[in-house]
Image: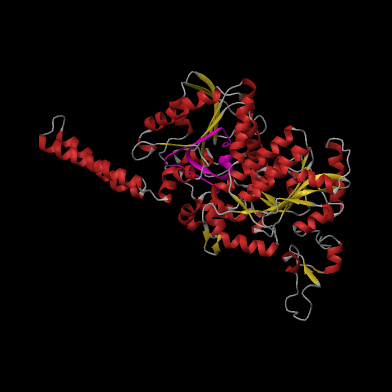
């Protein structure tokens, strides 16, 4: 549990206790007390969540109880057939990919997958994909184009796995090839950041016609720890880095780098997976419909123009 | 040119600083005129010392005088009003400008490479470690777009610490932007040759550089995805001791070749000759002017 959630949780427990003690038919006095406490809980939750610091958002984005890619697929899609492996080297459990039905339409879904337990996190490398994970994704992007199926991607990674073995297998090459492929893919692509959008490892699944972020997620040039290591030469400054990098969903919407912020249920997506998924569904369904109706050349050109416009520079006299 | 002044002889104040160069890798001391004549390649350890953009352009083109630079007036904005403990981003850019006499971390233009006009983008490592910000990305994207429009082959020379942190997600998006532009050039069957010089790291390795048709490493260049500081900061363990040199990366199957500096221009010209569309007009300043328009 996160520190700023602790007060809320104590209050929540207190209410639950009262309800338990009062039984199915509480006296009017207890009922009144419960109503007051409930209001207080709502007010305090709203207050905390209206004033989250960037670092608190980072913590929420990484919350171990947060819904992950598989949780969203289960709730958004009526069926899902997971496909494994890059046909080159291995199957990478830190990327989940497959065929699914969304709104009656066959789609390809691809996302980073974190674990919930320590054992599962070790298995899934904490959502840090290996080159073979990105190449599995690439294989499915190719398939999506050949069969004319739109792509939904879900971003949730601290960053691409940076070990020597990943270097050996061409981590940079895998990321670059995915971006190049997605940039030109001749089917609609919708990207959703559902937790941590960490650096190139996120962007390797992040080039699409629309980019959405859940309300309490982050998307950053480097994880706050990595940025702190680069800027302050110590990852202990992660909190400062988080504040400086402008990495929250509202920041990035204002910067024009994403298209939509998807509201989360009160207290964060981890409190209510179903509502979080329903909110995302409500955004994705009409958006996908609209993109699928567009001429594919127009769509690919618009995607190029969209990323082409990302950046701020100025002109001064040549030195 | 700051790189030139790196040498000097510690403890021998009487020896003119400009006369001797110390190799960055092996520490060997070399007589500067000889070192320069050897294209700044260390005769002891074969380390290919960093070149600044002007030196690189002179190395690659038939006549650097014929190089027509584009977009020299593009420079960084400060979208996040970013500041580090060591100073504001605006100040860092100003210092980099003063240090390198460049407005950004890449120099782009067109010029003749063994008689054939090529679109050439050379990163300037002295400009904030060659990091890629929005303005850098804008220039790289324009380079690919111009080459596409005029059907020119592209040569890029990378020397970069990666994405420029001071611009946050704006910097990350330059990876997508430049890679998309490179991909579009590829669709038009125009060759892109990338020379990865020392060092080529992170956001540059993992974007337009790695999707080149042919990737050439410079001997001894460090080429990797994760910088050692990042590995140490995030994995909480010491960075691997391996060198991540071009030769090592070549053995992993990720580079096409590693070419000594002396043979670089001839090699580039040869491979471009094999891949590029047949060339008719010889490059003249007029060609360059037309491309710039």
Quarter of the rendering containing residue B280:
top right
Q: How is the image coloured?
A: secondary structure
Instruction: Identify the residue shown where x is 61% and y is 60%.
Output: B93
Instruction: Identify the residue shown where x is 60% and y is 33%.
Output: A303
Instruction: Identify the residue shown where x is 18% and y is 38%.
Output: A34
Of residues B223 and B209, the one nearer the viewer is B209
> Magenta segment, which residues?
A192-221
Quarter of the rendering containing residue B194:
top right
Residue that sits furthest to the bottom in the current view:
B14
Q: Is residue B247 left or right of residue A211?
A: right
Relative to B237, is B281 above or below?
A: above
Of residues B17 and B289, the one nearer the viewer is B289
Instruction: Identify the residue shown where x is 66% and y is 29%.
Output: A87
The N terminus of chain B - image quarter: bottom right
Quarter of the rendering containing residue B215:
top right
Of residues B72 and A238, the one nearer the viewer is B72
Q: Is residue A118 left or right of residue B90?
A: left
Relative to A161, is B106 above or below?
A: below
Q: Is residue B168 magenta?
A: no
From the top left corner, tell me how far across and down residue A16 is, in percent.
Answer: 23, 38
From the top left corner, tell me how far across and down residue A128 is, in percent.
Answer: 55, 41
From the top left corner, tell me how far across and down residue B69 is, in percent.
Answer: 76, 52
Relative to B28, is B134 above or below?
A: above
Any part of residue A85 in sight: no
The C terminus of chain B - image quarter: top right
Q: Is residue A194 magenta?
A: yes
From the top left corner, tell me how far across and down residue B265 is, in percent.
Answer: 85, 50
């Amino acid at each position: 549990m996160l520190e700023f959630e602790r007060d809320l949780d104590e209050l929540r427990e207190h209410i639950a206790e009262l309800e338990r003690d009062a039984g199915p038919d509480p006296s009017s006095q207890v009922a009144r007390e419960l109503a007051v406490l409930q209001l207080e809980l709502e007010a305090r939750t709203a207050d905390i969540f209206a004033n989250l610091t960037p670092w608190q958002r980072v913590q929420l984005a990484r919350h171990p109880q947060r819904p992950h890619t598989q949780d969203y697929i289960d709730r958004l899609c009526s069926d899902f057939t997971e496909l494994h492996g890059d046909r080159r080297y291995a199957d990478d459990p830190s990327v989940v990919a497959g065929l699914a039905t969304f709104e009656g339409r066959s789609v390809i879904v691809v996302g980073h997958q974190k674990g919930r337990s320590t054992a599962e996190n070790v298995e899934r490398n904490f959502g840090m994909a290996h080159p073979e994970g990105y190449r599995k994704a690439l294989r499915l992007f190719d398939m999506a184009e050949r069969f004319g199926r739109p792509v939904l991607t879900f971003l949730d990674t601290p960053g691409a796995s940076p070990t020597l073995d990943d270097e050996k297998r061409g981590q940079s090459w895998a990321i670059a090839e995915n971006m190049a492929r997605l940039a030109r893919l001749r089917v609609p692509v919708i990207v959703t950041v559902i937790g941590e959008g960490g650096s190139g490892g996120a962007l390797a699944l992040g080039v699409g016609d629309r980019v959405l972020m859940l309300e309490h997620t982050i998307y950053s040039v480097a994880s706050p720890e990595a940025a702190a290591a680069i800027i302050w030469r110590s990852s202990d400054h992660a909190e400062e880095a988080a504040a400086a990098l402008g990495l929250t969903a509202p920041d990035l919407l204002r910067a024009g780098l994403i298209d939509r912020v998807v509201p989360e249920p009160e207290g964060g997506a981890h409190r209510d997976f179903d509502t979080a998924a329903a909110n995302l569904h409500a955004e994705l369904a009409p958006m996908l419909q609209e993109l699928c109706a567009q001429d594919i050349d127009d769509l690919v050109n618009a995607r190029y123009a969209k990323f082409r416009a990302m950046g701020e520079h100025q002109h001064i006299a040549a030195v | 040119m700051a790189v030139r002044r790196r040498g000097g002889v510690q403890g021998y104040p009487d020896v003119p600083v400009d006369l001797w160069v110390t190799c960055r890798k092996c520490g060997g001391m070399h007589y500067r005129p000889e070192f320069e004549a050897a294209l700044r390649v260390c005769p002891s350890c074969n380390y290919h010392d960093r070149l600044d953009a002007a030196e690189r352009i002179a190395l690659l083109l038939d006549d650097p005088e014929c190089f027509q630079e584009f977009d020299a007036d593009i420079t960084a904005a400060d979208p996040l009003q970013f500041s580090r403990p060591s100073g504001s981003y605006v100040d860092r850019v100003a210092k980099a400008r003063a240090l390198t006499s460049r407005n950004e971390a890449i120099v782009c233009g067109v010029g003749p490479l063994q008689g054939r006009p090529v679109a050439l983008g050379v990163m300037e490592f002295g400009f904030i470690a060659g990091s890629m910000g929005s303005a850098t990305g804008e220039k790289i994207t324009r380079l690919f777009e111009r080459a596409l429009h005029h059907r020119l082959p592209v040569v890029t020379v990378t020397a970069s610490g990666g994405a420029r942190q001071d611009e946050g997600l704006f910097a990350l998006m330059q990876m997508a932007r430049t890679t998309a532009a490179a991909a579009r050039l590829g669709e038009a069957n125009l060759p892109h040759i990338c020379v990865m010089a020392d060092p080529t790291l992170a956001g540059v390795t993992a974007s337009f550089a790695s999707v080149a048709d042919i990737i050439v490493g410079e001997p001894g260049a460090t080429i990797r995805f994760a910088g050692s500081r990042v590995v140490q900061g995030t994995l909480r363990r010491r960075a691997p001791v391996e060198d991540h040199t071009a030769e090592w990366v070549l053995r992993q199957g990720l580079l096409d070749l590693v070419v000594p500096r002396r043979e670089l221009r001839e090699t580039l010209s040869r491979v471009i000759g094999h891949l590029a569309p047949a060339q008719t007009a010889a490059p003249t300043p007029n060609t360059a002017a037309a491309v710039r328009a």
